[in-house]
Amino acid sequence: MKSAFQPDNSKNSRIFSVRDTENSRLLDVTQSMENDEENEDEKEDEKMSKYCNPLIFIIIFLVVLVILMLSLVVFWKLEVGESCPKNCPELPNECKTAECVALAGTLLSWQNTSVDPCEDFYEYTCGKYHEHTANEGTRMHEKDEIVLNLIKHFILKNQSTNSRSEIALKLLYKSCTESHRRENIEDHIERVQVEIFQNIQKIGKWPIADKNWKESDFDLNEMLTNMAKLHMQDFGFFETGLVEYPINGSPKQLIIRPSLDRFSISQEKLAETIFDVLRFSGHDALRKNLLRDVQESLDLDKELGNFYISLNSWPISASLEEVQSAVPNIDFERIMKSFLHPEHGNWTRLKAKISSGRFDSFFNSKNNISAIISRTKPRILANYLILKYIEYAQFFYALAPISLESEYDTCLMVITSFLPRAAIRVFVRNHFKKENKAVASELVDVIKKAYIEMIQNSTWLHEETRKKAILKVETLKKVIGYTEEYEKEGALDAMFETNLRISESIMLGNHFQLHLSPQDSFFTLMTKINRFKTEQLMEYVSSDSLFNPVEKTTTANAYYYHSKNLLSVLVPFLDKPLFDFQYPKYVAMAGVGRILAHEIGHAFDTKGRHFNELGEKTDWWTPEDSVEYDKRVMCLRDQFENFKDPSYGGRQNDSETASEMVADALGLEASWIALESMDMSKEESLVKFGNEDFRKLFFQVAALDFCSPTRIDTHHPRFLVDLSHPTNRFRINGAFSNLESFAKTYECPVGSRMNPEKKCRMF
């Protein structure tokens, strides 16, 4: 019996037989296919052997390469066509001057492109400023420091020079630093006290120092005249000063007015100072009533200060003759003459430029300085004048030692302040491109035309106001760097003379020369320099020159003067990185052009609008226009009040900053109009910016001058007081957000921070 688990061999035999047959057939087919494949391989090998010819391979490769290159060209054209569909120009040439390359690097380094420009353009342009500079201010502030360091570097170079002005600078700087070193300060103080006493002897006899003094020794006008020769302009009874405001048809006047400065020193301190002056000069024996003499002078000074003085509202201008008649015991003409160079001063021209106001201290019929002088003892008057000179001299020649560890170079400040033209000459001769001056002057003319267009297109100005506003722009005067009298080679240098060489003449043209010697003490040098500056100032008052000789010239800035309707642009402001004559037009207009337009905007700010084209204070607006103007200013003030600046911890006074906001608004609009009037078809691009719209670059470059550190220090003085200018962030975000041109350029949606629905505009 078969087990149930025993295989059926006959059945299996049949299955295996069938499988063997199928496998045999499959094998035959496979072998046949293999044979066919072998035949095909042989045929393919024959074909490949034909194509392996090197020449044929090279030809095929070249054809493929050409096809690929043509495809890339077509693709590139399609891409360009999408970005500029109409008459797409070729890629512009790049400006590769050192100044342009540096500017491009600045733009790229300072910007923070992760920020949406339509939300915070300040951060977009300036967000990484603090990563690239240790400067605590803007790049204009940094330029100020650079200019000073360049002048200092030149002075300290051990290099001989034949330039008179350079010798004068080096003499003054060396004398200042040596005199104020700690090891020399005591000798310096002693020498100053001795020289002060020597100058007192030039003024007149001093009762306190002369036991034989008698009333007949006193001559009021002789003493006042001698004080004027020592470059004093404040005599206690009155003072003189330059006023650049149209009076009697003249834009510049030498004004006689009441003295504003009273003694700022105690009786004991003043007595101690007198003791030192006398002791170092060999006068040890002091009168026993010294304190009484000092107190009498202090009492007289207090009485002279009791008059009410309002310098902002002079009822009627008074001539020199009228003041002389009101105060007969002071010979004003004699004193004024002593300000002039003794040989070359022009009294006729200066006299025509002297005037005063009808102050109580001069014209009060019951009590004025003439009455006070008449009832005061000559001894008191003589002591008073000498003490006024001592206080002036002690304050003027700072006796404190200079800290050599301090970054602040006091002596550098001294030479740039007291020899401003000589200082700027060093910078101009060694570092300044004079082409910049000519291009900047042309830029002002373009901006003036833009202002006229803006005023003409105003929708709210009445015709009467419009014509006067345009006239003010048309008659605007300008000083770009320096005036024409200094264009001639050596003109500036001709004013300076030293005893290191023989002077061929003591005067060249209208410029008086300054004689200095290495043997002069610091006190003597300063006395000579200030006498020289007084003579220069009198010449400036008498002439038609627009270049004030005593104003500081080494800062990177520009100014508008309401009372002169004058735009003054200082040389450092027209230098790299702020300006270069080879900059593309849109860069020049965005940088220096925008700031010049801002300064011209001050002609129509909340203060400047009250002055006419001659600089006279008058109301030339129609009542309706004044009301509308105030509404538009209020719009700016409200905008500023609601502006949040995270980098500022103080409270700003929007009434104080209103003038600057108006100038910003007008300046931006005018510079944009000027930009649109220029032909940009041939202007070069900036490196790495390729086909970037020059309009976008205009706004980015315009913002650079406001980039500043975002460090917040609530203990810094600027956080404790009101500022006269809005914060830098507002001057970009706030001002730019009012421009339709900005929103259009950056395609900012309405309602974004840089494109608010409500905008503030002036004209």
Image (spheres, rainbow, N blue to C red):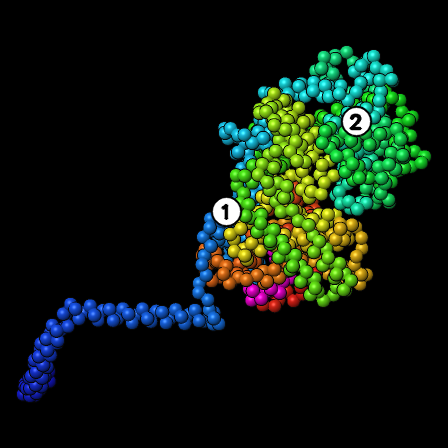
Helix, strand or loop status at disc 2: helix
CA separation in Å, label 2 and label 1: 57 Å
Image height of 22 relative to 592, above or below: below
Q: Residue 447's spot in the image, x, y percent?
A: 63, 57
Residue 469 seen by the camera: yes
Q: Residue 656's spot in the image, x, y percent?
A: 72, 50
Q: Which amino acid type is marked by label 1?
A: His
Q: Is residue 83 magenta?
A: no
Q: Residue 403's spot in the image, x, y percent?
A: 59, 28
Location of mark 2 (residue): 225
Q: Principal SS element in the magenta part? A: helix
Label 2 or label 1, whichever comes before in sequence order? 1
Q: Which residues are magenta?
A: 731-747
Q: Is 475 displayed left or right of 732 in the figure?
A: right
Q: Which mark is residue 132?
A: 1
Q: Residues within 10 Å of mark 2 (few under 14, many from 20)?
A: many
